[in-house]
């Protein structure tokens, strides 16, 4: 596995008074009242998702679940927002790359 495959990509946006965060590599989404809350919730959800895959009943389906990408429109939005972040300061959206939450044996 390449090191870059241990990074999960996502974005968060503030829309209609609510923050939403999306992991485009695992097709996960959360909502919250602040940037910090949605990042924390997405970390927790990602950890639980991966734990269920590797230690739970979903293990036989690990290959499918780990390859479950977000819909194309969300992946395109991530790349668009990442580009816009490079060009200008955005206050209501941000993109991120974060390490996959793994515990080594």
Image: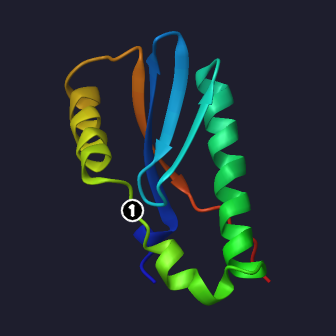
In the image, 58 versus 51, the foreground residue is 58
In the figure, residue 51 lies in which quadrant?
bottom right
Q: Which residue is at 32% across, 53% downward?
A: 71
In this rendering, is residue 58 above or below 91?
below
Residue reaching furthest bottom? 60
At numbered mark 1, what does the secondary structure look like: helix, strand or loop?
A: loop
Residue 81 locus on image (x, y percent)? 28, 33
- Asked whether, in this view, residue 84 is left or right of residue 93, the answer is left
The quadrant of the image that shows the C terminus is bottom right
- Asked which quadrant contains residue 85, the reply is top left
* Above or below for 30 versus 4: above
Q: Which residue is mark 1?
A: 69
Relative depth, front residue between 69 and 92: 69
Please tell me which residue lies in front, 90 or 58: 58
Left or right: where does residue 77 sit relative to residue 58?
Answer: left
Residue for point 44% across, 45% down: 10
**Image spot of residue 96 (x, y percent):** 45, 42
Give me the residue at 31% from left, 17% from top: 89
* Residue count near mark 1 (Cα–Cα under 10 Å), binned few <14, some 14–19, many ≥20: some
Q: Is 11 displayed left or right of 74 in the figure? A: right
Answer with left or right where residue 38 lies relative to residue 89: right
Q: Position of residue 56 (x, y in %)?
A: 77, 78
Q: Is residue 17 above or below residue 33?
A: above
User: Where 45 sits versus 17, above or below?
Assistant: below
């Amino acid at each position: 596995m390449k090191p870059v495959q241990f990074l999960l990509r996502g974005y968060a946006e503030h829309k209609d008074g609510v923050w939403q965060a999306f992991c485009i590599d695992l097709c996960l989404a959360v909502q919250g009242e602040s940037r910090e809350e949605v990042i924390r919730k997405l970390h927790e959800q990602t950890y639980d998702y991966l734990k269920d895959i590797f230690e739970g009943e979903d293990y036989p389906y690990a290959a499918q679940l780990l390859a479950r990408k977000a819909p194309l429109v969300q992946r395109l939005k991530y790349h668009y927002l990442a580009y816009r972040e490079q060009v200008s300061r955005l206050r209501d959206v941000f993109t991120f790359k974060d390490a996959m939450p793994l515990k080594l044996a």
